[in-house]
Image (cartoon, helix red, strand yellow):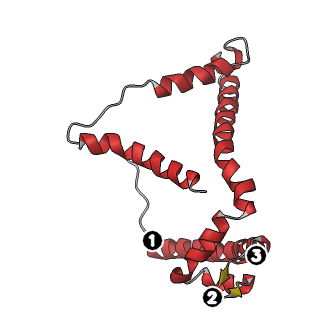
């Protein structure tokens, strides 16, 4: 018995693209633009050429790449960034660990296996810590044709750049 692959239909493909474009445009219009305006109204905007930048003018500057740098700088030095966004980076690691923990418990229960649900004395938290240690101590496999110094330097440069950005605040 052979399976016949469905034929490519240009009309269905174009309809899918236009449907996606329509919904993206609708969501950006109804949610994205108001969210940007709310952030601009509550953000301390910079003084440029002796004038205080208004939220309406800042919104027009968002679409002009040469004018975005003062807006980005004012966002990085704002209280909103320091209180909400910056602690979010550290909180993301806790969210990831919690998500992995809950996912493993659910999968173990669904598959009727021991797994981290009954493993250890602390409801499987030691399993999560053990997997983290295993991930850190794994052997690094470098492809044969890879540039070895660049292969080692890329993650270090990435973390260093992120750390330098955070330190500069």
Res 130 seen here = yes
Q: How far apart are marks 1 and 3 (CA)?
A: 38 Å
| Closer to us: 131 or 109 | 131
- The local secondary structure at tag 3 comes to helix
Residue 86 in percent (x, y) is at 67, 52
Q: Quadrant of the N terminus?
A: top left
- The local secondary structure at tag 1 comes to loop
Q: Which of marks 1 and 2 is nearer the N terminus?
A: 1
The residue tagged 3 is: 34
Residue 123 in percent (x, y) is at 73, 18
89 over 99 or under it: above or below: below
Q: Quadrant of the C terminus?
A: bottom right
The residue tagged 2 is: 49
The residue tagged 1 is: 9
Q: Earlier in the sequence, mark 2 or mark 3?
A: 3
| Closer to us: 36 or 112 | 36
């Amino acid at each position: 018995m052979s399976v016949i692959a469905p034929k490519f239909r240009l009309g269905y493909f174009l309809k899918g693209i236009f449907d996606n474009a329509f919904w993206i445009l609708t969501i950006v219009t109804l949610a994205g633009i108001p969210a940007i305006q709310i952030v601009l109204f509550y953000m301390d905007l910079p003084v440029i050429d002796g004038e205080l930048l208004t939220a309406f003018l800042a919104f027009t500057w968002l679409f002009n790449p040469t004018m975005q740098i003062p807006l980005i700088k004012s966002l990085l030095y704002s209280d909103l960034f320091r209180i909400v966004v910056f602690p979010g980076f550290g909180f993301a690691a806790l969210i990831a660990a919690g998500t992995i923990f809950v996912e493993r418990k659910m999968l173990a229960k669904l598959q009727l296996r021991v797994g981290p649900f009954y493993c250890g004395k602390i409801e499987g938290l030691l399993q999560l810590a053990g997997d983290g240690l295993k991930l850190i101590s794994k052997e690094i496999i470098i492809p044969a044709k890879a540039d070895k110094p660049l292969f080692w330097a890329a993650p270090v440069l990435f973390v260093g750049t992120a750390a330098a950005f955070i330190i500069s605040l």
